[in-house]
């Protein structure tokens, strides 16, 4: 870890914190959007993570993922309950899948595909967690609606991210650095 | 543009396959076998797939059943002849064990057969 | 030993946590959860009935699919069993208790040590700025609005005075005694539950 950070340029703490704050802001926006189903989520806070794919080096990306989890947990006050395990499992698995897809298959997938894959990974991990922590075997009963909603919202978020990367002056300026 | 569409479609199809597969859970839960226990006029129900130890008190003492790995047997009973204990393990719907002295009746049912009223006809 | 109020609250919470997690008695966990909710309310957190009701109902309903114990009644051929209800309710109450305990623990905005602590406080600083800046930005083309927001944030000078929101005031003897009392109540309820003093439902 130490040798890794030495060979690279110094970590851009301010920049990562900015993206982390952006994620926090988006999750409060999401909180304000009324949802028909209690367990439904849109995953707006994943936008900064997806933006970070193209702008951050691996170490910085890991820090951003940590900031998203910790920041959300601190704001909602769930840091020391096992709700944070859902957040942790979901975010880490989706970040990992999205990172691998972006870096190994970016010629073959757009942000839409990356968004779908990330959401599926996150939702499957969360279902497995809810099987062991909350619902028992009947967790699998909520699997179909949960996965379908995740697929739908991730497609929308993926299209939005794709548009953002194409149109945002800020993003293009950062990406060209 | 075309090329990224290929990957996106592949991911979308894979996700849809996972979702279709997840519907399989509905079938599993409906047909799950249950252990029905009748003690006097009280009815108890247990999931055969969940390991449990349950104790019931009848007219002459306590009778305990144990569910392990999808099978159930009478673990201990305060009756004299212990016929129920020597009956051993049962695991398939329709199989039953009875402890007459203590008035405990144990039967395995698939949930779908419950409305045929199997328990009541045999027990009474 | 000098420790800030916020971090004392955090440590108190950590000591209370296992008392809920280990609780096997439904009445015990219900009392523990109620105590913690009152505690969180006392420290300015809000209590909303509906989300908690949803947790309680959905977790209990999920456990009904695994029948366990005395059949109370049936809906069609579907048995409603006392043991399944009790297990579901206990798990839901543990979750609710932990949620409010967690909220109580971070009410003072505790500080984290080292580099991580620094970057988290930086993140929260930016977050406060976003919420104020966002009000002044025209939202119509949403991508343009986000662009404006991100450019504005970058221009902020973070080297200057960054007022920490943490309650850095050191804890006094009274804080320690109150904290000790809370820990005592939670563990007391745990022991009452595990030694069979509290009634066992189902």
Image (cartoon, rainbow, N blue to C red):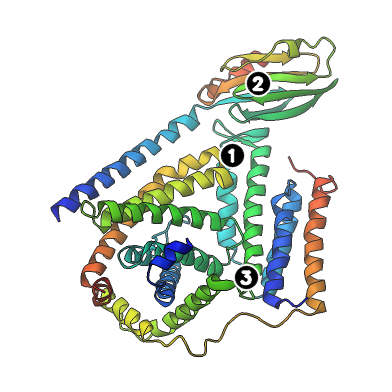
Q: Kindly identify which residue carries mark 2.
A: B72
Task: Identify which residue is drawn at 40% across, 70% down.
Answer: A26
Q: Kindly identify which residue carries mark 1.
A: C64
Secondary structure at badge 3 equals loop
Task: Identify which residue is drawn at 70% across, 83% down.
Answer: C169
Side of A10 where A74 appears, left or right: right
Q: What is the chain identity of the residue bearing mark 1?
A: C
In the rendered image, the vertical position of residue A49 relative to residue C111, given as above or below: above
How many residues crowd around disc 1 within 10 Å: few (fewer than 14), some, or many (20 or more)?
many
- Disc number lying in front (1 or 2): 2
Give the camera-side residue of C176 and C160.
C160
Q: Kindly identify which residue carries mark 3.
A: C106
Residue A150 position in % (x across, y down): 37, 52
Mark closest to the chain's N terminus, 1 or 3:
1
Residue extending farthest to the left is: B2
Q: Are marks 1 and 3 in contact (CB under 8 Å)?
A: no
Secondary structure at badge 2 equals strand
Q: What is the chain identity of the residue bearing mark 2?
A: B
Query: Does the image show residue A167?
Result: yes
Query: Does the image show residue A152?
Result: no
Residue B95 position in % (x across, y down): 61, 14
Give the camera-side residue of C152 and A143.
C152
Per the model, the C-alpha gap separating discs 1 and 3 is 34 Å
């Amino acid at each position: 870890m130490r040798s890794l950070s030495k060979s690279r340029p110094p970590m851009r703490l301010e920049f990562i914190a900015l993206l982390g704050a952006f994620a926090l802001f988006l999750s409060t926006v999401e909180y304000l959007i009324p949802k028909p189903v209690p367990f439904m989520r849109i995953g707006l806070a994943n936008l900064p993570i997806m933006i970070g794919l193209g702008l951050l080096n691996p170490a910085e990306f890991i820090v951003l993922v940590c900031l998203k989890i910790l920041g959300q947990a601190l704001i909602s006050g769930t840091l020391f309950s096992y709700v944070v395990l859902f957040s942790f499992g979901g975010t880490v698995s989706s970040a990992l899948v999205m990172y691998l897809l972006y870096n190994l298959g970016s010629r073959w997938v757009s942000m839409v595909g990356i968004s779908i894959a990330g959401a599926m990974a996150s939702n499957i991990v969360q279902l497995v967690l809810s099987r062991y922590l909350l619902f028992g075997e009947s967790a699998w009963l909520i699997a179909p609606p949960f996965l379908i909603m995740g697929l739908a919202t991730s497609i929308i978020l993926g299209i939005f991210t794709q548009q953002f990367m194409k149109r945002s002056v800020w993003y293009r300026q950062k990406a060209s650095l | 543009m075309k090329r990224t569409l290929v990957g996106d479609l592949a991911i979308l199809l894979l996700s849809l396959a996972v979702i279709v597969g997840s519907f399989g859970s509905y079938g599993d839960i409906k047909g799950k076998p249950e252990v029905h226990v009748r003690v006097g006029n009280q009815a108890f129900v247990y999931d055969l797939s969940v390991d449990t130890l349950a104790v019931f008190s009848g007219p002459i003492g306590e009778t305990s059943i144990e569910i392990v790995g999808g099978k159930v047997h009478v673990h201990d009973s305060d009756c004299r002849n212990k016929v129920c204990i020597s009956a051993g393990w049962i695991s398939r719907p329709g199989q039953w064990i009875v402890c007459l002295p203590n008035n405990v009746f144990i039967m395995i049912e698939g949930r779908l057969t419950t409305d045929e009223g199997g328990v009541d006809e045999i027990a009474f | 030993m000098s420790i800030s109020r916020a971090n004392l609250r955090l440590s108190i919470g950590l000591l209370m946590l296992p008392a809920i997690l280990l609780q096997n008695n439904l009445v015990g966990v219900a009392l523990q959860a109620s105590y913690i909710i009152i505690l969180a309310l006392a420290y300015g957190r809000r209590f909303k009935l509906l989300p908690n009701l949803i947790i309680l109902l959905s977790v209990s309903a999920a456990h009904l699919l695994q029948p366990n114990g005395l059949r109370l009644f049936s809906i069609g051929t579907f048995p409603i069993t006392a043991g399944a209800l009790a297990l579901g309710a206990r798990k839901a109450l543990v979750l609710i208790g932990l949620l409010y305990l967690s909220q109580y623990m971070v009410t003072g905005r505790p500080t984290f040590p080292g580099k991580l602590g620094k970057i988290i406080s930086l993140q929260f600083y930016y977050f406060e700025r976003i919420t104020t800046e966002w009000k002044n930005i025209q939202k119509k083309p949403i991508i343009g609005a986000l662009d404006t927001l991100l450019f504005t944030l970058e221009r902020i000078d973070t080297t200057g005075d960054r007022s920490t929101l943490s309650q850095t005031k050191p804890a006094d003897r009274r804080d320690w005694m109150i904290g000790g009392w809370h820990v005592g109540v939670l563990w007391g309820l745990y022991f009452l539950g595990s030694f069979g003093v509290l009634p066992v439902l189902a």
